[in-house]
Image (cartoon, grey):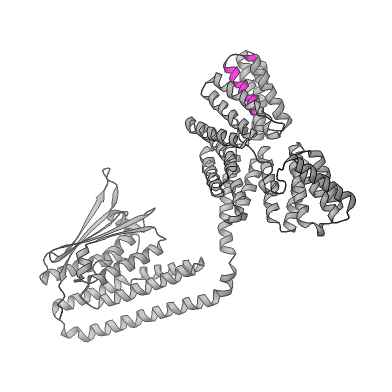
Amino acid sequence: MLFFRYAFFLCIVSINAQSVEQPLDTVKGELKILQKNILNSESPEKIKAYYDLGDRYMKKDMDLSLYYFRLFIKKSKYSESEELFGWSHLKIASLLYKKGELESSLKHYDSAEYYSKKSRDTSSFLATVNNRALLYKNTGKLKEAAKGFFYILKHIDNQEKYKFEKYLAYNNLGTIHLNIDDPEKSKIYLLKALDITKELEDVKLSLNVLLNLGEVESDLKNYDSSFNYLEEVVKIADSLNNRNFLRLANNNIAYNLYLNKNYEESIVYAKKALEFRSVDIQSLGSDTYHTLGMVYMELGNYDLSEKYLLKALDISEKHKLKSVFLECKLGLYQLKQKMGDYKSALKLHEDYVAIKDSFYDGSIKKEIKNLESNIIIEEKQKELENLSFEKKTNEDQFSEKIRTILQIIGAVIIVTIVLMRFYFLRNKANMAEGQKKLTEIRMELLRSQMNPHFIFNTISGIQNFILKSEKYEAYDYLTKFSDSIRAIFENSGSSFVLFSKELNLVRRYVHLETMRFRNKIEYIEKIDEDLLEKDEMVAAMMLQPIIENAILHGLSNKKGPGYIKFEVTKEKEYLICIIQDNGIGRKAAQEIKKNRPQNHLSIATINTNERMNILKKMGHHRSKVSYEDMYSPDKKPLGTKVTVILPIKRIVRK
């Protein structure tokens, strides 16, 4: 593949913002004023005029621009021109890069970084990191380039004012992944960059991304999509009269046509691309000459093929466009083979292998992925290590409030258990056998509801929110926990309760567990409207334990998200409740339970079955609970479906 068919930004908008193109007459007039200021004024105005002249000459005369920028640095004092020091070195570095003086360019980028940090000028600092990363990318130092772009993303975070810098980083990371034969990852970054251009409403910026997406789709062999992107580039570039992108788009279309063996049409587009070339390093046409060389090779015109390939080789070598240079070596090797010149072909192949090994280290792809992973890890560590100012100042107060709330909850739980135990013992002698059995099961159910798993997991959830400084989530969690405890105790005091209370208990509990499992659980509820309107009495605390079992033993051990479906309908004097989950299934849950000392599922199941038997003895013969294991056609577990039939007790209203 031809790596340098896409466009490169050599200077970002942050630089161009200080050197906006103006009509030639206006520029000449301003230059005369600036030159007059140098002759007639004293420092600091005179010194500042050197910088302004360098800025104005950047697009007119690179040597003269360099002269004035260097004169500004030599004559000025850092204390009087802090920000301009960084910008001067940055612009000198960019000019030197255009002239092909790479080592000198890098030295000035280092100086630009130093002065932009010292003056705390974020704009010039980000521009420096970006342009230096571009230099590394264009010269084949992809790991160093990726490091620079990742640094930009980490530095700006989600600050709105740096959307353009984020766009540059995403776009260039996309082209880097394209260079290392990872078009899928490239496409992810490029689409992010394209989204930002839409947010910025900047059609000109979208040209670069669309051109790169065209190349990605070509590498993925999605040629129709590639042509669509490139045609959009031609349309926009033509409306903006942007010759550089017209050249690049026509060149890429020519290369796509070559890959599709449409050689004659490929030549037409390649020659059209050459009509738009300029003397800029971005637009010297080496990639187009390479395409023509490959096309003429396929057409059997070996003389023309060699002519164009050698021309592309010469330009790419002169301007250090290593990826194009590498492709030219490969093309010439293939040409010499076709011509029967095997001696020359062997030499070219040896050169190609040597250059490829030095330019594209086989481990570069892995190193960039490791770099990306390390940066993500560093960000997470930074989030843990660097506490915000607000957290530091309120940490003790917030911790004290949490401790107080936990102490109150603990005291309420202990007092409530003691009081309920006392109430149970006081009335034990006067209870009928059926009511006595119901009370015992209710107390057992209360203990299963308040088992150590539930309390430990709740407090662990609170601690997790506190450690992550999510104080509002912690408060909300504590509130829901308190409401759930209160509802459990209220419902535990009666054999039958209003359906609305039983439903609210289920909702509070599911909401609490959803928060603890970080929204891993989706709760789907469908309730008969007639039940909600009449709000009749139902057997207390029969539904929540079954839902708890579904979550703790079905969904908590499931990889990925899960759901609980809770459906309640009415059939004459009974509730028909269906509780369905897509967890691991009872068989898998049973295997996991063997390795755990707790027996929560068994306790809840026994309590439920005993209560059902007592309800039947009281005359509610249809009362029952049944379990159904669900499987896919290939016998894979799809979860558990529990059907509960409960009697409805009419309210006697006075």
Total count of labels: 0
Q: Quick check: 184 above or below 489?
A: above
- In terms of depth relative to the viewer, which is nearer, 430 or 167? 167
- Position in image of residue 227 (x %, y %): 51, 31
Q: Main secondary structure of the magenta part?
A: helix
Determine which quarter of the picture holds residue 43: bottom right
| Front one among 263 and 443 | 263
Residue 506 appearing in the image = yes
Residue 301 forms part of the magenta stretch: yes
**In the image shown, does 241 or 213 lie closer to the viewer?**
241
* In the image: residue 523, left or right of residue 320: left
Q: Quadrant of the C terminus?
A: bottom left
Q: Residue at x 86, y 48 (%)?
A: 36
Give above or below for 218 relative to 538: above
Instruction: Decide whether residue 615 is among the magenta residues.
Output: no
Range shown magenta: 287-302
Q: Quadrant of residue 575?
A: bottom left
Task: Residue 260 in the image: state x and y as whole percent.
Answer: 51, 24
